[in-house]
Image (cartoon, rainbow, N blue to C red):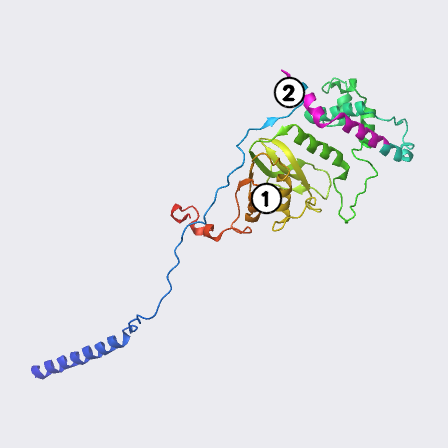
Amino acid sequence: MEKPLLMNFLYQQYLRTRENRKNDESRKITRPPPADPQIQFPTPQIFQGPPTFHPIIPKHHPHAAYNTLPSKIRYQHTVEPFEILCLFLTPSLLEDMAAHSNAYAAAKASERQMESGKKWMEVSASELGVWLGIVLYMGVHSSPAVRDYWRHNGLNPTHHVCEYMGQTRFQQIKRYCHVSSPDLPKIAPTGRRLWHSKVDLILDQLRKSSHQYHMPSTHVSLDECMIRATGRSPDTYKMPSKPIKQGFKFHCLADHGYIWDFHPTSTQAAPDPVPSTDGLTATGEVVYHLLRKLPSTIYFIVYLDNFYTTVPLLGRLRHDLHMGASGTAHPSSAGFPPELKIPKQDIGNPSTMP
């Protein structure tokens, strides 16, 4: 009986092995037929490197900055700060401001009659200069209240401004001081609000003197600047992350800390209008407008940040003004070369840099 049982067992094992082989063959992945040698597959794209860069060839040699001060100041051994200040706040500017202040005070004559014991006397250019000097002094030596500068009670510091002007006269000039003519329109014929027209006289003189008494070096920069202003105005900017949190913003062309030119802008009125330039954004047109004021007989290189830098702007500066430019740029900016775009996951990896 042992032999039939053994034969039966072996026969069952044979059937199982045969079934397993059939199942394995059914699970095998069929391979595709061999490729036809006549079929042409596309060649994979290989990075050929960044676009060819042709360096700009300047027409003039690099130069250092130099001043063009009047000879009577340039050759002095010691220059007083007041002499430099008078080049920007000129006597003619003070005379115009005094005339406009008197005109504004005359227009408010009916309101002055309501004041008791405060009769207005016309201000002169020299007296207005003293008033401006006191204002500058207050900016350096701050006190909680204006009246503290005229107190002599032993509890407050002794200020000598009272030797040049009384407190009542100071407050009168402060109330009626007008830089520009009070008759200037507040709305342009195009309907644009002239938000800085009241100080245009000072802005124009500062711009004119800045051009006249300094020649920038080859390397200049253009950036935003803030003038601190905490009063209520619809034209101020609020930038909590900046050193100056709130104030009026200007686009400034500078050279080693010296502002050579500027262009005001507003949160509501936007930048002041400039001549339009094909292919440039509104901000690019402001940059182009400021840089074209530089002397064309001297070579300049301007440095920008990613707020200004666009490929069309750099092309305009090179083609029209023959001016070099360098700056950071967003990959999403207009005209950015696709060959220079790097995926975020590859940033910082030297092997993926183009």
Q: Nearer the viewer, mark 2 or mark 1?
A: 1
- Which is more N-terminal, label 1 or label 2? 2
Residue 175, image x, y percentages: 82, 32
Given residues 95 and 320, the one toward you in this image is 320
For this orientation, the residue located farthest to the top is: 77
Secondary structure at badge 2 equals helix
Given residues 150 and 285, the one toward you in this image is 285
Residue 340, image x, y percentages: 46, 50
As drawn, the label of residue 103 is: none
Q: Return the residue at label 1.
A: 320
196 to the left or right of 345: right
Kindly check if marks 2 and 1 are in contact, taking CB atoms under 8 A apart as contact.
no
Residue 175 lies in magenta, yes or no? no
Given residues 241 and 31, the one toward you in this image is 31
Q: Amino acid at mark 1?
A: Asp
Residue 82 lies in magenta, yes or no? yes
240 to the left or right of 177: left
* Residue that appears at 45% across and 48% down: 52
Residue 137, compared with residue 303, is above or below; it is: above
217 to the left or right of 191: left
Q: Is residue 160 visible?
A: yes
Q: Is residue 247 visible?
A: no
**Magenta stretch bounds:** 75-102
- The local crowd at label 1, few if under 14, some if 14 to 19, many if 20 or more residues have their Cα within 10 Å, is few
* Residue that appears at 83% across and 28% down: 172
Given residues 351 and 92, the one toward you in this image is 92
Q: Amino acid at mark 2?
A: Arg
SS assignment for the magenta stretch, majority: helix
Residue 56, image x, y percentages: 50, 41
**Snapshot quadrant of residue 132:** top right
Q: Return the residue at label 2.
A: 74
